Image (cartoon, grey):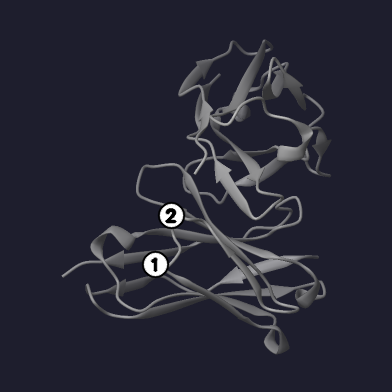
């Protein structure tokens, strides 16, 4: 089974910009991995921010954006707010959608 | 409004069986895959598998194949995750989600397995 890697922790100043990345042990992450990004705060269910690399959901603040960067999926937060402090997880698809794997998560401190 | 509502917390002993549920509303339940996700205490998210209620197709993560069973009853818009013999290591919160951009999540079901 593939291993999906994320930075264990990152810190950003309020108003600052930070990029979280999501890599795959099988090689470069592409649009064919349909990268998803989730935010989870303590005691809550995850909330989806981005699906299919770049698509924001209706509730996703515009300060969050998804992309591919240097062979990885990336989530960029521009203009960090204190309420963005949370755990962030990526999810990648393998074998034509027959298997999906979460990354280990990034703890973001604002 | 699309909603997924999961069954309540469970406390079980090792070796017991368990079936937890996830009821969908606000959409045609049979037309969307339902995913299940595990979160062990203080740990990250783990993808268990998905099921398509419309025709009962199932795809398991290799890590969970043979350990759990996914099922659904589309007539009552409900998906299930079950164990035939629980272990202490099954203690976790289990989430269901609509596998369509994961645009809806259940609130989670806490399962505690302890002797």
Q: Quadrant of the C terminus of chain B?
A: bottom left
Q: Residue at x 66, y 45 (%)?
A: A93
Percent position (x, y) of residue B60? 54, 62
For this rendering, which residue is in front, A83 or A100? Answer: A100
Q: Nearer the viewer, residue B50 or A107?
A: B50
| Element under disc 1 | loop
How busy is the neighbourhood of tag 1: few (under 14 within 10 Å), some, or many (20 plus)? some
Q: Label 2: which residue?
A: B63
Locate residue A52 relative to residue B86 in the image: left or right. Answer: right
Q: Position of residue A41 (x, y in %)?
A: 53, 40
* Labels 1 & 2 near each other (Cβ < 8 A): yes
Label 1: which residue? Answer: B67
Q: Chain of mark 2?
A: B
Q: Residue at x 53, y 49 (%)?
A: A44
Q: Quadrant of the N terminus of chain B?
A: bottom right
Q: Quadrant of residue A59?
A: top right
């Amino acid at each position: 089974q593939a291993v999906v890697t994320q930075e264990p922790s990152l810190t950003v100043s309020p108003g600052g910009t930070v990029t979280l990345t999501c890599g795959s042990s099988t090689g470069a992450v592409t649009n064919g991995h349909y990268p998803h990004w989730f935010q989870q705060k303590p005691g809550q269910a995850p909330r989806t921010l981005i699906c299919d690399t770049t698509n924001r959901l209706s509730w996703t603040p515009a300060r969050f954006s998804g992309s591919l960067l240097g062979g990885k999926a990336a989530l960029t937060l521009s203009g960090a707010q204190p309420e963005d402090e949370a755990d962030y997880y990526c999810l990648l698809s393998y074998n034509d959608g027959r298997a999906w794997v979460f990354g280990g998560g990034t703890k973001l401190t604002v | 409004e699309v909603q997924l509502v999961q069954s309540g917390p469970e406390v079980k002993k090792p070796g017991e069986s368990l079936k937890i549920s996830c009821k969908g509303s606000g959409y045609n339940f049979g037309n969307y895959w339902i995913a299940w996700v595990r979160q062990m205490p203080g740990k990250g998210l783990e993808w268990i598998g998905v099921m398509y209620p419309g025709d009962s197709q199932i795809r398991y993560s290799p890590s969970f194949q043979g350990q759990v069973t996914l099922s659904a009853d589309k007539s009552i818009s409900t998906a299930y995750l079950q164990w035939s013999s629980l272990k202490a290591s099954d203690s976790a919160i289990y989430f269901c989600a609509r596998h369509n951009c994961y645009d809806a999540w259940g609130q989670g079901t806490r399962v505690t397995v302890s002797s």
